[in-house]
């Protein structure tokens, strides 16, 4: 009997130790599932939290303007993969992609993001990362026909590693399908520009049906793999989806119906995780979740008040609040600003567009926007954590210009394998430095994040309650002076 008691105690001790390893990181900080509670996000203990972080953009899907790759024109990830495979073989292609991915994101980045006081990372990926996107036909590599795409469990290695890094540094992960099968928008950031009018995913034909079916298969595989992983906070169904018409991109009842199909497929496997539904671009482009019976969802928008548009920041962000109040007040869901950048009203493109001078600096604009997001309880992830540039508001980190050769760009169509590898390896995390002019505008506001979530009062009520800088126009500033 004594031996049995000792054995039982030993088993209990082992299980307790295993649980501690699963539930805590190496700093002893607990990691729990999060879910929505009305317009709030709460953890397993019922504590309301905010999600504020950045994107690991350019890692698993390149965008030429963001990363150290330039071929003199826009390209998609699939184009690059085919060119590399046809020049260096499939093994050579993967050798180069490994060099790039090993260096563009490393453990140091997760530590730095955590040290900034941020608590989550949005991780863009595409179907190409998890399937068999290319195949050899004769002596040439070509795209794998959509119908022949299959999930490859061995290709989850990168996402698995990123999630482990998030766990180690107490960061939540948002898994963002940046590129669906056939592309959901036809843009370079989806990894496929073959059909720039909006991609093939939304086609009302057999090809569209196949693309949607294969995309659903990938989400089912993701949900199966991570259904018990609390480090994953959100499944982001797809980045900037939209059917293009007359040059505009928007979500419609067709896209909503497909979101519902994905939602139901995921929920059959995983009832734990928050599901993010994205709009292109306003809150009016998303339905009332009650229409489809969606639960534990977050609505996502991207804010880019492009300087060339000539719209003052006070007007732009005031409009976002008004739209949020009119549309999502009855929705009662949390808000995620999954991507954003900020341009001051003094930016030369704004001044040229409006003819109006402004004293607003970049620091004032960034401080003002982050202050607003935190005050309204709008969760956010900046675009981006890193930009291959000497100084840019597109990156929390920019390259160290004192390191030789950082301006060099890889041309995968003309350079040798060694030349490409050398350039991509140079852009490792060690050769990037924090962009303090940007991070100093973000970190001071995080401690005051409104965890009540999604303040959907009217613009007038919000302005009367707090004099947010970014909502003040030049006349307000002049009067204050």
Image (cartoon, rainbow, N blue to C red):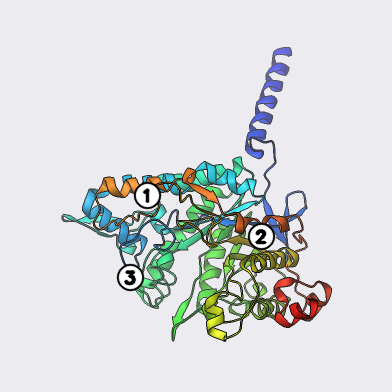
Image quadrant occupied by the N terminus: top right
| Residue named by callout 3 | 194
Q: Nearer the viewer, residue 412 or 334?
A: 412
**Between discs 3 and 1, the one toward the N terminus:** 3
Farthest-out residue, right:
465
Q: Is residue 295 left or right of residue 239?
A: right
How many angstroms separate mark 2 from mark 1 (CA)? 30 Å
Farthest-out residue, top:
2
Q: Position of residue 447 (x, y in %)?
A: 75, 54
**Between discs 3 and 2, the one toward the N terminus:** 3
- Density class for disc 2 (Cα within 10 Å; few <14, some 14-19, many ≥20) is some
State whether residue 94 appears in this view: no
Residue at image point 56% right, 76% down: 281
Residue at image point 54% right, 69% down: 259
> Element type at marker 3?
loop
Q: Position of residue 299 (x, y in %)?
A: 63, 68
Residue at image point 75% right, 74% down: 456
How many angstroms separate mark 3 from mark 1 (CA)? 32 Å
| Residue named by callout 1 | 405
- Density class for disc 1 (Cα within 10 Å; few <14, some 14-19, many ≥20) is few
Task: Nearest to the eye among marks 3 and 1: give it.
Answer: 1
Q: Is residue 137 above or below residue 165?
A: below
Task: Nearest to the eye among marks 2 and 1: give it.
Answer: 1
Image quadrant occupied by the C terminus: bottom right
> Element type at marker 2?
loop
Q: Position of residue 115 (x, y in %)?
A: 64, 45
Farthest-out residue, left:
139
| Residue named by callout 2 | 441
């Amino acid at each position: 009997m004594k031996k049995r008691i000792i054995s039982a105690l030993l088993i209990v001790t082992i299980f307790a130790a295993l649980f501690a390893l699963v539930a805590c990181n190496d700093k002893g900080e607990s990691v729990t599932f999060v879910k929505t509670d009305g317009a709030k996000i709460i953890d397993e203990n019922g504590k309301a939290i905010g999600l504020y972080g950045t994107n690991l953009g350019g890692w698993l899907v390149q965008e030429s303007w963001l990363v150290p790759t330039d071929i003199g024109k826009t390209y998609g990830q699939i184009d690059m993969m085919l060119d590399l495979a046809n020049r260096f073989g499939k093994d050579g292609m993967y050798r180069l992609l490994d060099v790039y991915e090993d260096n563009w994101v490393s453990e140091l980045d997760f530590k730095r993001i955590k040290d900034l006081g941020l608590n989550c990372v949005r991780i863009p990926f595409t179907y190409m990362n998890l399937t068999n996107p290319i195949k050899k036909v004769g002596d040439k590599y070509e795209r794998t026909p959509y119908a022949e795409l299959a999930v490859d469990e061995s290709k989850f290695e990168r996402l698995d590693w990123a999630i482990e890094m998030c766990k180690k540094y107490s960061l939540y992960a948002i898994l963002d399908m940046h590129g669906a099968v056939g592309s959901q928008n036809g843009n370079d950031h989806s990894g496929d520009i073959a059909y720039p009018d909006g991609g093939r995913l939304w086609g009302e034909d057999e090809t569209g049906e196949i693309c949607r079916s294969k995309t659903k298969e990938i989400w089912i595989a993701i949900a199966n793999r991570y259904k018990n992983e609390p480090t994953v906070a959100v499944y982001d169904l797809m980045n900037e989806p939209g059917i293009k018409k007359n040059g505009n991109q928007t979500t419609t009842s067709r896209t909503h119906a497909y979101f519902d199909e994905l939602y139901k497929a995921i929920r059959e496997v995983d009832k734990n995780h928050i599901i993010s539904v994205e709009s292109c671009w306003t809150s009016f482009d998303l339905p009332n979740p009650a229409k489809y019976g969606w639960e534990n969802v977050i609505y996502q928008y991207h804010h880019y008040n492009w300087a060339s548009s000539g719209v003052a920041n006070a007007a732009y962000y005031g409009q976002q609040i008004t739209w949020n109040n009119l549309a999502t007040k009855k929705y009662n869901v949390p808000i995620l600003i999954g991507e954003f950048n900020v341009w001051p009203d003094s930016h030369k493109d704004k001044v040229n567009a409006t003819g109006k001078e402004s004293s607003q600096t970049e620091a004032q604009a960034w401080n003002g926007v982050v202050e607003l997001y935190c005050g309204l309880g709008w969760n956010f992830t900046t675009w981006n954590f890193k930009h291959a540039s000497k100084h840019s508001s597109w990156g929390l980190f920019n390259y160290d210009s004192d390191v030789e050769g950082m301006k060099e760009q890889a041309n995968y169509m003309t350079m040798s394998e060694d030349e490409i590898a050398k350039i991509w390896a140079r852009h490792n995390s060690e050769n990037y430095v924090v962009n303090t002019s940007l991070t100093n505008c973000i970190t001071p506001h995080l401690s005051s994040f409104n965890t009540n979530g999604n303040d959907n009062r009217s613009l007038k009520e919000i302005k009367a309650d707090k004099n947010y800088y970014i909502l003040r126009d030049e006349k307000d500033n002049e009067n204050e002076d």
